[in-house]
Image (cartoon, rainbow, N blue to C red):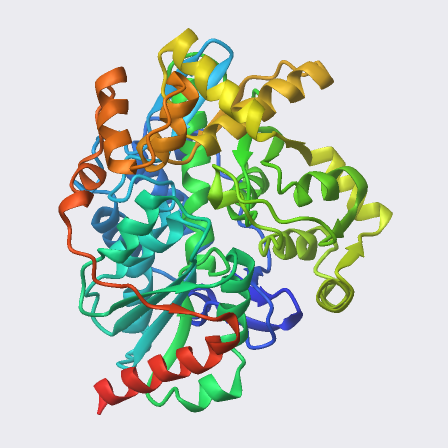
Amino acid sequence: MKYISSRNKNYALESHQAIIRGLAEDGGLFTPASYPDALRPEDILGKDYRGIAETVLKAMLADYTEEEIRHCVNSAYDTKFDTDEIVPLTALKDGWLMELWHGPTSAFKDLALTILPHLLTTAYAKEDRHDVVSILTATSGDTGKAALSGFADVPNTAITVFYPEIGVSAVQKRQMNTSKGNNVEVIAVKGNFDDCQRMVKEACSSKEVLDACTGVTISSANSINAGRLIPQIVYYFHAYAKLVSEKKIAWGDPVNFAVPTGNFGDILAGWLAKKIGLPVGKLLCASNTNNVLTDFLNTGTYSLDRTFHTTMSPSMDILISSNLERLLFLLTGQDDEKIREWMRQLKEEGSYTVDDAVFRQLQDEFAGIWTSEEECAEVIHDTWSNEHVLIDPHTAVALSAMRKYRKESGDETPCVVLSTASPYKFCHDVLECISGRNIPDDFEAMEVLHELTSVPVPANLRDLKTQPVRFTRSIEIRDGMHVIAERMRSLSHVQD
């Protein structure tokens, strides 16, 4: 299986090469050129998370050997997770929560970012390369810490994370700014996530940056990297297999998935799972008040002519959803010319409208639903009050979407809600939602939330307050390329 650029389908790489590269030189995203044979029940059922991961990754990353895949899987999904299940399911009265936050940074990004460093270093060994891979990463909160944790002191790598100075939670900011590792750097940007993401993408083709890359290769840990996206397919199969094993469904029964969505990577992984054999019904694209995806799925027009909102679900405070480009490329039958034109329109005119054939496919497979801040708070409160299950704001947005969709459509298909972060990453807001108490200090709020609910605080978050802050730098958006070039030159000197 080859991976091809969404803006030039003739630019094809093996999967390990696409993982090293991250983003294509033309700005396109590496996308599977074809789908493997559909996975069968006997390929999945009866296996634990690691076994299912091996099966899925062998199918999607065909140029890695079985031994290489097994090494990557076993190195990633080990005692870094606080449960042997890796991804447990919690039953609610009207569905299930897929708990994706039991890894080392208490967010769903851990499922991909614990394995990406191993996929990358294995890819480097296959190429017998020894230059430095510079991982440039934009984050709206969770990706940054998960990437910093995954790549800390990994040989032949360096990682630089850019995050919006305003718009991440205090816990998320402290997680990043206390990161350990001699090869890591964290920089705040006076802008929003879209500005950070634009900087990372621009750096891949910036002359100033590339001229500074002597002995350095730029890559990314964002979901624009196929090595981030593909491992996310695994937990859809795992959740479905668990429902089958518990006799909640039979193999072949459709299951809907409600996904809190910002950059469209997590929900795209669910769509790819469907393409390789998972009986997915509807994918519910759940948005907060930054509802650009809701409008797009309901109208076929993607428009940036809207207000940007800072919400209590900051990982979804995104207006440019990069992975949507991959989906559109596949839905158009790999029409790279059409994708180039739509992306040009978005950049120069602020909007584009897909054709009728693509719009019909979107309507068939996705539903776009958005949730207000008030509704989100109510769901957090009621889920604790009625079911004694504590959830974070991103999970609440997805749970709200599931219930709105069912009410509006009458579709009672069993539904799994992706629970993407520990509630303690957003303890100030969660505490206020369930108790009405407004405690500005996040670490005091964390203690009070634990006292009130007796829900355990993940160890990595509990210990944050005493960790020394290492990174305090903040930059203007306009200085982005200069700062990245400066970082590349420093890495080039390491090679000297």
Question: Is 479 on the left-hand or right-hand side of 33?
Answer: left
Residue at image point 55% right, 41% down = 261
Q: Is residue 390 above or below residue 130?
A: above
Residue at image point 22% right, 85% down = 494
* Residue 54 visible to the viewer: no
Question: Is 159 on the left-hand or right-hand side of 251?
Answer: left
* Residue 403 visible to the viewer: yes
> Which quadrant would the C terminus be assigned to in this image?
bottom left
Q: Nearer the viewer, residue 322 or 38?
A: 322
Q: Residue furthest right?
A: 356
Quarter residue 465 falls in:
top left
Q: Is residue 433 above or below residue 312?
A: above
Q: Is residue 89 above or below residue 51?
A: above
The location of residue 490, given as percent across then percent down, is 28, 84
Residue at image point 73% right, 62% down = 346
Q: How many marks?
A: 0
Residue at image point 56% right, 30% down = 373
The location of residue 455, given as percent across then percent down, is 25, 21
Question: Is 128 on the left-hand or right-hand side of 386?
Answer: left
Quarter residue 42 falls in:
top left
Q: Nearer the viewer, residue 276 or 148?
A: 148
The location of residue 243, given as percent across then percent down, is 43, 19
